[in-house]
Amino acid sequence: METRELIFKNGKIVDVVNQCIQEADLLVRNGKIEGVGTFSGEYEIDCTGKYLCPGFIDSHVHIESGMAVPMEFAKTVMTKGTTTVIADPHELVNVKGNDAMEYILQTAEDVPLTVYVMMPSSIPATPFETNGADFTAKDMEQWKDHPLVLGLGEVMCYPAVLAKDPEIMEKLSLCKGMVIDGHAPGLSGDDLKAYVDAGVMTDHECTSYEEAREKCLAGMKILVREGSAARNVENIIPGLIKEPELIPHFMFCTDDKHLDTIENEGHIGYNVKKSIELGMNPVQAVSMATYYAAQTYGLKNAGVLCEGKDADIVVLDSLTEVQIHSVYKQGRLVDASLFAEDAKPVKESMLHTVVLKDITKEKIQVKAQGEVPVIGMIPGQIVTEFLREKVPSEAGWFMPDSEYSKLCVFERHRGTGNAAAAPLKGYGITNGAIATSVAHDSHNVIAAGDNDEDIITAVKAIEDMQGGYALVSEGQVIDTLVLPVAGLLSQRPAREIQEKIDQMLEKAWEMGVSRGIDPFITLSFMALPVIPSLRLTDLGLVDVDTFQRLS
């Protein structure tokens, strides 16, 4: 940490408390802001014509979605202006339980990015799937007083809350007085009120302003999400602009965003830029990315440029275009020197997590008599449609084609041999298959293709790699991305991961996957049985709207 005095001269400071822009100097010493006013000294940075914003805060992120270990994730997002994240490691914890909590908290202490952690609440998210480890209220007791732990991660199984299920109520009680994140797509009326009354405080699943407004007026803080697959800024911000008195109850998150999307678009700064383009006052947009997030999560050292706060500063050449000139973390320039230390080796307990059993074509046959349940994908969204359609068949069995892919899930944690399959509409893959061990949130192996042989080959490639992505065509593995840490993360440099993903995306699209769909991220969500309307787990199809498994 630098100890010298540093002065940011003649900047236009975005005052998120008073909602104005103040022309002044910032005095920084020992990583903290020591004053706002007029100063001079030996070390000055000329900020004439530039805007100084507090470091951006991602209010809800799964670091695992970047598929890089936390150090590499930090290198990527910090250059984009994000200096603090609130991470929910439920992807890792679903695979490895307490070992994963220990891993994420230890790595959080080693990276220059400020990483706060929410304790995952839904392990597994529902009873309709098989995950890798338990994580009970008893397990949480050892972590809740850790200085980096802020509260309870997204409470995904809201039907359990409404039913006052003892297990989730015990977790809510344990975290009383802490922040409790929600996850309740479409919840409304009396059920919403009951969910909020149980102690749930936030929601990041709103896909319309009407939904966000109702939840806000019910007492929730709203996290406006813009990730790789789920993009909600455009649907929410225009309505919010018309009711500016509600803006202090809103903030930004990415939830799930791939490295390549971050590199091409930006991170939280992209949410800010897009909101400004939609007509939001720039100071209000910056406030959502900083001050309102810090207030909601009780971050005492972040979110505002004033005396006593961390000197987390984003210097912009253009406020309206959110054009980043430079980023400072606790007074240090974010550049290669900030990441001089390599990530520490990953413990053996976080490796070798793909255990498959009896992977055969017989397990993934789907009867196709009359109209059958079909998962309908929606471009740009992770919600799905529950369709009932007549699908192509042969001798009474579903035969995938370019319109109807075969979606499969194979249990990979406990050696049960569970497998399930269903028709998937809108994916479009032809002459091949894609498989991955990234399948929210239990992270079994999920695959989609237009023939059984390539599906099986792709799944076995995942087992051989002990996690990752695999592209297969005509029986040949044509490309892979290896993710050995819990089957979710790579230990390679972020740039290498990004380049490999870009390469595989192009190949997947060449194989017919719709350009409006991320071939990997969107596929990964097809196994998440807490997002409407129809999903597939290792135990079969789940009707999320009625919260029942289909027979």
Image (cartoon, helix red, strand yellow):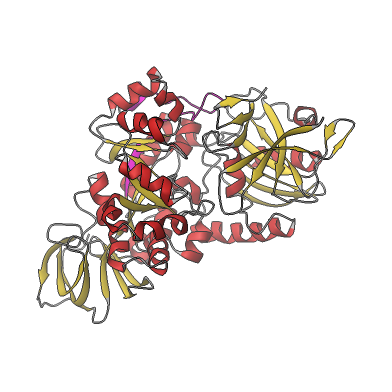
Where in the figure is residue 282, as x and y percent of width and height?
31, 68
Above or below, 394 relative to 418: below
Where in the figure is residue 209, as x and y percent of width and height?
42, 51
Where in the figure is residue 422, as x and y percent of width and height?
71, 35
Q: Is residue 323 left or right of residue 17?
A: right
Q: Quadrant of residue 405?
A: top right
Q: Is residue 438 visible to us here? A: no
Q: Nearer the viewer, residue 299 or 1?
A: 299
Residue drawn 63% across and 36% down? 445
Q: Quadrant of residue 363?
A: top right
Instruction: Provide the residue span drawn in magenta.
Output: 115-141
Residue drawn 49% across and 48% down? 65
How many marks on residues?
0
Q: Would you say the magenta stretch is mainly helix, strand or loop?
A: loop
Q: Does the magenta stretch include residue 117?
A: yes
Q: Does the magenta stretch include residue 124?
A: yes
Quadrant (top left, top right, bottom left, bottom right) of the C terminus: top right
**Residue placed furthest toward the right:** 395
Where in the figure is residue 317, as x and y percent of width and height?
33, 77
